[in-house]
Image (cartoon, rainbow, N blue to C red):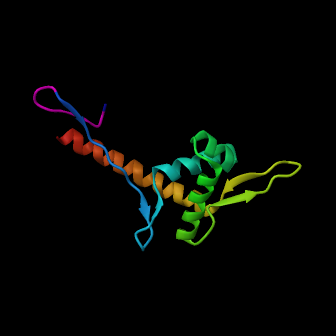
Amino acid sequence: MLNEIKLIGGLTVKANFRCWLENDRGEQIIGPGLYRLLTEVKNSGSLSQAAREMNMSYRTAWGKVKKIEERVGTQVINKTVGGKDGGGSELTSKGYELMDIYSQLKQKLDSTLREIIEEL
């Protein structure tokens, strides 16, 4: 594995990190969990289905989305109430923007970590 370091005596350790984006008050906006939730919404078109895929309740998923929306000051998901054609959820442009920024940051950090491991 690329993030593994072999130590003297054969012990292998793995370098790892967690990253997230915060607002100017230090409140988390998006990290690995919300990124996955938004990805599931994007793929399924449903917050309910996304919650099921992540083994969480709809209420928990909705609470996480609402908390983030409060922290960024705008919607990240548009929700359509069910009916004859059923409901659904889709990401707003801000939702896509947050996912894109987080994804780019994570990819660059992963790449930098691999470079550091190779140097060690």
The picture places residue 64, in percent across and down from the top left corner, at: 56, 58
Give the quadrant of the C terminus: top left
The answer to if 82 sits in the magenta stretch is no
- In the displayed image of the protein, which residue is found farthest to the right? 84
Report which quarter residue 6 is drawn in.
top left
The picture places residue 112, in percent across and down from the top left corner, at: 30, 48
Q: Is residue 68 left or right of residue 3?
A: right
Q: Vertical placement of 102 versus 40: above or below? A: below
Report which quarter residue 4 is drawn in.
top left
The picture places residue 86, in percent across and down from the top left corner, at: 82, 48
Q: Which residues are magenta?
A: 2-10
The residue depicted at 70 percent of the width and 53 percent of the height is 89
Give the quadrant of the N terminus: top left
Q: Main secondary structure of the magenta part?
A: loop
Q: Is residue 108 left or right of residue 103?
A: left
Q: Vertical placement of 23 versus 3: above or below? A: below
The picture places residue 20, in percent across and down from the top left corner, at: 41, 57
